[in-house]
């Protein structure tokens, strides 16, 4: 099975032997996950408060406006995650009817965003009054659950021939098309990449990935060259200092912020780039302000916490795999892939290793939709971890 290499790398995840021959139990995956997420939320509040004060004051808002909003988003996210954890049975979640209902709702909401008011030239949000909800975040979670069930329910088609890919393309293709209309190219890449990853570990033939990889590459090149703003971002990425006052402004300022921070940073609250030099620094470029104020040490801490969250998701996936609970295992794996993709893309674009893209750092960047859905994903991971042993004893066949 294609999952075997992942399985072998995780064999020592449960315990290690001490020098006197005793067994030292590692913290449970749920404990590490909760502790890491908790630390990330605290750091997020601290850095959003620091990075957003100049921007808020320049807009006539209270200096802690974005801090208070981020705290509100976290509170709402925790409540919704708790409700999902206690009230949504996994058996119900993996029913085909439930999944197509969620896909239908998500597609409808994506269509409604096209009639909304553009923000920075894009129509990605629904105005819910207290929050502008980005439906693409919900689409990521729904796609994970749907594809995780599909590769189990249609396992023969997935592993033999093209039927599995063709069937899933009819569903996922609609969602990705709606994402492209917004346009939200970053979320589209994350969704497609996650689908490919789940299909890969489910045992889909290698030749499919070669062929589809070629198709996706061609489509990606066309998407970049046919949209002037995407082409400008790519050209800016190749030389971030050739037009520092215009097309390279954000990326150049981000790199300057990292350069000023050096190893230990200039000190909390002492960033210069947040003083209207780096626009809306509390959102996608919050890591750059962290690098300036807390230096290499601060950035390393953020990335280490993200790694612990991702590692916990993969450990939960592996535990479910050992119990032959394939739907649950693929779901946890898919969530881990989402966190990996967004962490790498956000960090890379902040550091000039990738073109700038509107993707948040999970649990860290300012943003209600991302925070809410990320916390719901954590609730789903915790539910899988908690119920997996019980389901094994009852020999549940829906998981």
Image (cartoon, rainbow, N blue to C red):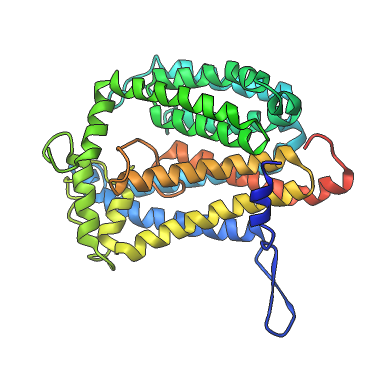
Judge whether residue 79 can be spotted in this image: no
Furthest residue in direction right, as rendered: 394
Q: Residue at x 22, y 33 (%)?
A: 235
Image height check: is 53 above or below 266?
A: above
Image height check: is 120 above or below 26?
A: above
Where residue 94 sits: x, y (%)?
Answer: 73, 31
Q: Residue at x 27, y 48 (%)?
A: 52
Where residue 338 sits: x, y (%)?
Answer: 52, 40
Residue in the foreground of this view, choosing between 198 and 9: 9
- Tell me where residue 106 sits by quadrant: top right
In what quadrant of the picture does the N terminus appear?
A: top right
Q: Residue at x 47, y 22 (%)?
A: 215
Left or right: 298 as drawn, with respect to 85: left
Judge whether residue 304 can be spotted in this image: yes
Residue in the foreground of this view, choosing between 226 and 285: 226
Q: Residue at x 30, y 47 (%)?
A: 350
- Tell me where residue 113 sits by quadrant: top left
Where residue 263 sits: x, y (%)?
Answer: 28, 67
């Amino acid at each position: 099975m294609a999952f075997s290499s992942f399985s072998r790398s995780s064999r020592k995840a449960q315990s290690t032997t001490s020098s006197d021959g005793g067994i030292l139990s590692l913290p449970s995956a749920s404990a590490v996950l909760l502790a890491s997420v908790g630390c990330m939320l605290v750091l997020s509040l601290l850095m959003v408060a620091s990075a957003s004060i100049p921007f808020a004051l320049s807009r006539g808002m209270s200096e802690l406006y974005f801090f208070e909003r981020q705290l509100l988003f976290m509170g709402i996210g925790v409540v919704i995650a708790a409700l999902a954890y206690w009230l949504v049975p996994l058996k119900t979640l993996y029913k085909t009817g439930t999944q197509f209902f969620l896909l239908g709702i998500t597609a409808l909401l994506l269509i409604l965003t096209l009639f909304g008011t553009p923000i920075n030239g894009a129509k990605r949000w629904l105005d819910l009054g207290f929050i502008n909800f980005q439906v693409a975040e919900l689409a990521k979670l729904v796609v994970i659950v749907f594809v995780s069930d599909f590769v189990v329910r249609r396992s023969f088609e997935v592993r033999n021939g093209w039927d599995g890919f063709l069937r899933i393309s009819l569903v996922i293709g609609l969602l990705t098309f709606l994402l492209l209309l917004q346009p939200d190219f970053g979320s589209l890449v994350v969704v497609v990449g996650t689908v490919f990853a789940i299909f890969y570990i489910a045992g889909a033939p290698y030749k499919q990935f070669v062929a589809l990889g070629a198709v996706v590459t061609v489509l990606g090149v066309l998407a970049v060259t046919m949209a002037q703003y995407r082409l400008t971002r790519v050209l800016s990425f190749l030389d971030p200092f050739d037009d520092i006052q215009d097309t390279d402004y954000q990326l150049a300022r981000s790199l300057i912020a990292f350069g000023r921070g050096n190893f230990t940073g200039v000190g909390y609250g002492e960033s210069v780039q947040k003083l209207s030099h780096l626009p809306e620094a509390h959102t996608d470029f919050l890591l750059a302000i962290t690098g300036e104020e807390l230096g290499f040490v601060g950035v390393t801490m953020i990335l280490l916490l993200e790694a612990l969250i991702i590692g916990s998701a993969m450990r939960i996936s592996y535990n479910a795999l050992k119990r032959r609970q394939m739907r649950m295992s693929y779901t946890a794996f898919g969530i881990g892939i989402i966190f990996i993709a967004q962490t790498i893309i956000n960090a890379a674009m902040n550091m000039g290793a990738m073109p700038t893209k509107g993707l948040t750092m999970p649990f860290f960047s300012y943003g209600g939709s991302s925070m809410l859905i990320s916390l719901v994903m954590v609730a789903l991971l915790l539910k899988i971890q908690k119920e997996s042993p019980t389901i094994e004893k009852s020999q549940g066949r829906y998981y």
